[in-house]
Image (cartoon, rainbow, N blue to C red):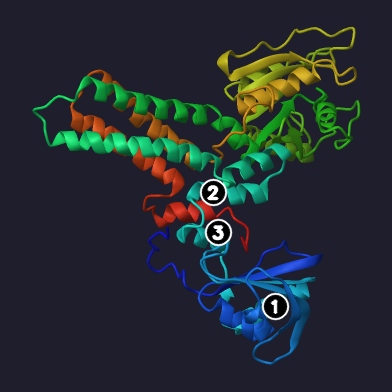
Amino acid sequence: MARPLPSGAGTEDLIAAPATAAGRSAIAIVRMSGKGAAQAGERLFGAKLSAASPGRMILGTLRHPGTGEPVDSCLAVQWRAPRSYTGEDLVEFHLHGSPAVVDAALEACRAAGARLAEAGEFTRRAYLNGRLDLAQAEAVAHLTQAQTEAGRRAALAQLQGGLSARLMERRQALVQTTAELEAAIDYPEEDIPAPAVERHLESVQGALAELRALLAAARRGRALHEGARAVLAGRPNAGKSSLFNALLGRERAIVTPHPGTTRDTLEATIDLGGVPLTLVDTAGLRADPEEIEAIGIGRSREELHAAQVVLFLVDAADPDPDAVEEYAALSPLRHFLVYTKTDLPAAEEALPRPHGETCAATLRISVKTRQGLDELERALLREATGTESEGGSLPAVASARQEEALRRASEGLEAAATGLSNAAPVELIAADLTGALAAIDSVLGLESLDEDVLDAVFATFCLGK
């Protein structure tokens, strides 16, 4: 069902954009959607496009509608509303993939009456026209941005309605429960029969269990989509670059026995149990460095506060007493204390000592023998996702917006369950359920959402999607 369109949204405009990445390629796609797309397509490609069956590719020539000049010999395909991705008339041109061809095709589309689409506008229209709910629309962005196989599978499951189906099933039961309770408000002198209370409580507790399961996996779902960031910090020559290379599986950072080799931050991303983990190698922390190294150390300190977790490395074979001071400075941050070079005879766990709850783990490793590296990777995965493996069912929640809404819904259901158990006033129970339903509806986009919310959701999309 189509949703009310926000005023001033320009949702009937004819829009055009490239649907493939910028740069040279074998094929590029330019698409148009909106009122007049079929007529514009015919002006650009000829009558045989409008005569072709929807969804059928045809070969022809794309021409500038003003000059008649040929732009490219290409394939074209059309879909008619409402059976298209956007729910509107939609036309695509599959062109030779040079930037010059794409630019000329877009200029031809503009001459035919189209304006350049905003990022995410095609999918936004699909949502507004009822082709996707909001959770599915968010999954489109997650799928196009997936960096790992696990991230791809999770996004595809959400696009295919995994989260939506689970929420809709519980929502229907909660709507019925809320309706019955609101009807009972009209008869305050009559108590709700015990069997009805038990039935309502069962419905609320079932929905609450479902939401708790979704929230329990939300941390992993967000990590699969957003990734995590781990910064390697410590004194010069503590083994940061060696560990960076070992986790990466190749020689990316320069490693020498001389301290101060790393003068700037260096980063790379690995697939850690399905999570895109960005590793950041930093300049060694020490007092009185030379000018260039001091700049690198300043950037290192900035990276520490942007990290999800810090790995503070200490050379176990030659512990630097000054490491205690550096460790104390960063210990309020979530971190691992990692003793390196433990294969050397002189290795000892001398300095420093773990700092309370902010220390996620204390580990001993040797890059040379690979001792402790598997344990370190498991610890990093656990810190990022709350689990040590990528096994189990695919997480359904993948955004902070969804997680926050489900948390609000869960709180409303908890209050309603408590009210039902304690024979609280029906008005209060119904109000808690209404609030929970509103939060669930915001995940699916079933309620009227502020333009700012929609803008934030679709701001992450690429142009042409």
Q: Secondary structure at mark 1?
A: helix
Classify 10 Å Cα crowding around label 2: few (below 14), some (14-19), many (20 and above). Answer: many
Give the CA separation, mark 2 to mark 3: 10 Å
Which residue is nearer to you in this view: 4 or 317? 4
- Residue for point 62% across, 35% down: 223
Which residue is nearer to you in this view: 402 or 131? 131
Outermost residue on the bottom side: it is: 67
Q: In this view of the protein, can residue 281 be seen by the observer?
A: no
Q: N-terminal of the two: label 3 or label 1?
A: 1
Give the CA separation, mark 1 to mark 2: 30 Å
Against 219, residue 39 (above or below) is: below
Against 396, residue 341 (above or below) is: above
Q: Secondary structure at mark 3?
A: helix
Please identify the quadrant where the C terminus is shown.
bottom right
Query: Which numbered disc, 1 or 2, marks the residue closer to the eye?
Result: 2
Determine which residue is flagged by label 2.
136
Classify 10 Å Cα crowding around label 3: few (below 14), some (14-19), many (20 and above). Answer: many
**Residue 374 image point, x, y percent:** 79, 20
In the rendered structure, find residue 123 and report the number of the disc placed on it: 3
Determine which residue is flagged by label 1.
105
- Residue for point 34% across, 31% down: 412
Q: In this view of the protein, can residue 387 be seen by the observer?
A: yes
